[in-house]
Amino acid sequence: MAENAGNLLFSQSVYRSLATPETEITPDGYQSHRRGDAADYAAHINAEYDAFVIPLANAFRPGFQKFLQRLTALVSKLTIPVVVVGVGSQHKLDVAADGADPIAVDVTAFMKAVLERSSSVGVRGEYTAEYLAALGFDDSVVDIIGCPSIFMNGPRPEVARPSGVLETDSAVAMNVSPYVRAMKPIVARHSRKYTDLVYVPQNHKDLAMMVWGLNRTNPKDLRNPTHTGHELYRRDQMRFPLDPRTWVDFLREREFVLGTRIHGSIAGVLAGTPTYLLAHDSRTLELAEYHRLPHAKISKLPKGIDAAELYERADFGEFEGRTPEVLARYTAFLEKNGLKHTFAPGSEPLEFDRKVAEAKLPGMVPTLFADGDTGKQAVMERIRDLHERQARIESTLSANGMILDDTGTVRYAKTGAGAKGLLSDSSRRMRRIVSTAFGRSK
C-alpha cells in the first residue's frame, strides 16, 4: 500500500477504469518508485507492454522527491506511451519556480519526460494546475481530472442524505491526520462524547501500532490517537483497512464519516454514507472544491465544533450534480492519451468486478484490546506469525551451519567432532545480518 491505505483506493480505481475486456493490466507493486537502476526494468516494460500508466497522489512534494527522481529515470528510458493519472501538488501556492522551491527542478524533469510520451498529464485540481503553470506547463498539456477514486464503484456515486440528528450513540467513523494540530481537541472531545465512534487510520505506522502494540510516535500529546494508551485504542475503537472493498463495506455500516483524510472521506462517499471533510491543506482542499464534496477549512471552524452540526451540513446534491461533468473530463483525458476505458458502452469491467467480489479478504484489523473471540483471534494470529518467522530464521541458520541458542544468540553449530563448522563468505554475511536484526529487537 506504499505506506498509506489511501493509495489502494485510487490505484484500484484506475485499474477498474482501464479493465476493459481486451485489456490486461499488470500492477507493478510500486517497483517503479523503488528501483535505483531502472535500465533492466525499463527494457522489460518496453518489451512486454503497450502503455505504462502511473496513478499518483500528492507526488509533487519534498517528501516524495527521491521517488520522483526514480520515476523520471525510468520514464526517460521508456519507448512506449506513459500516462500519469491524478497527480497533485503539496506546497504553498505562492512559491515561484525560481529555486526557492526545492523540488521545482525534479518536477520539471518529470513533466518533460512524461510529456515526451503522452499528450497531457492528469492533475487533481486547480492548485496543482497553477503550480505547474508557474513551471511552464499550461493547460495545453495539463488536464484537471480530480481523483479517479470517486469512480471506484462505477460512474454514478450516490450518497445518502442525513436523516434525523446525530446522537451520542450514533455510529460515527473518524479519520485523522495526526500532524494536524487542530484535530487534537476535536479527537479528544468526540472520543468522550460519541460512544460508538471508530477511528479509521491509514498509515502503515498505525497498522504496526494495532498489530504489535508499537506506539506510532512518542506520545507527547496524549490527545493524539497514535499510542496504545489512547482511549480509542484501549476501548478497541480503531479499525485499519487492508483492502478498498472491506474499507468501504465497513463505512457502509456507519451513520457518518468525518475527518481530514481525503481518501478516508472518499471511502465514506463510496459507501454512500454522509461524509464531511475537514480540509487542512491545498491537496485536500483542491479535491474537495473540484468534486464539490461537503467540506470546510479546519482553520475556519468555530471552537467546539461538533459532529452533529457537520452531519447536518453533509449535503451531496452539488456533488452528484457535478459528477457527470467530472466523469466526462476524466474519460476525455484517457481517450486523449490513447487508453480505452470501462465507462464506454460494452466495455464494463465485469471480469474485474467478479474477481474483486470473489476475493477472500481479511477484515478490518482490530486492536490488541478487542473483546471476546475477536481479541483472542487477533492475538493468536500475531503469535502464530511470530512463530512462523522464528521457524524460518532457525531453518535458514541451520542450512548455513549456525544455531540460535536459548539466550537468543546466533553462534556456530558444532560438528560431530566438536569443532566449529566452516562457513562460506555468504554464510558469514548472513550471520552478521541476522545477529544485527536480533540485536535491534531487544
Image (cartoon, helix red, strand yellow):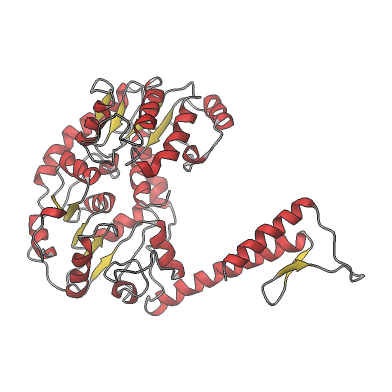
Q: Residue at x 85, y 59 (%)?
A: 422
Labels in figure, total: 0
Residue 313 placement, left or right of 380: left
The residue most toward the bottom is 372
In the foreground, 62 or 334: 62
Q: Name the image quarter holding the C terminus.
A: bottom right
Residue 414 in sight from this viewpoint = yes
Residue 332 in sight from this viewpoint = no
Pinpoint residue 400: horizontal percent, then vertical percent.
77, 59
Residue 225 placement, left or right of 407: left
Q: Residue at x 39, y 42 (%)?
A: 64
When the figure is inspected, residue 411 is found, relative to residue 140, above or below; the finding is below
> To which quarter of the image does residue 362 belong?
bottom left
Pinpoint residue 227: horizontal percent, then vertical percent.
36, 69
Pinpoint residue 414: horizontal percent, then vertical percent.
84, 69
In the foreground, 6 or 66: 66
In the foreground, 341 or 397: 397
> To which quarter of the image does residue 257 belong?
bottom left
The residue most toward the right is 417
When the figure is inspected, residue 356 is found, relative to residue 140, above or below; the finding is below
Pinpoint residue 397: horizontal percent, then vertical percent.
73, 62
> To which quarter of the image does residue 222 belong?
bottom left
When the figure is inspected, residue 338 is found, relative to residue 289, above or below; the finding is above
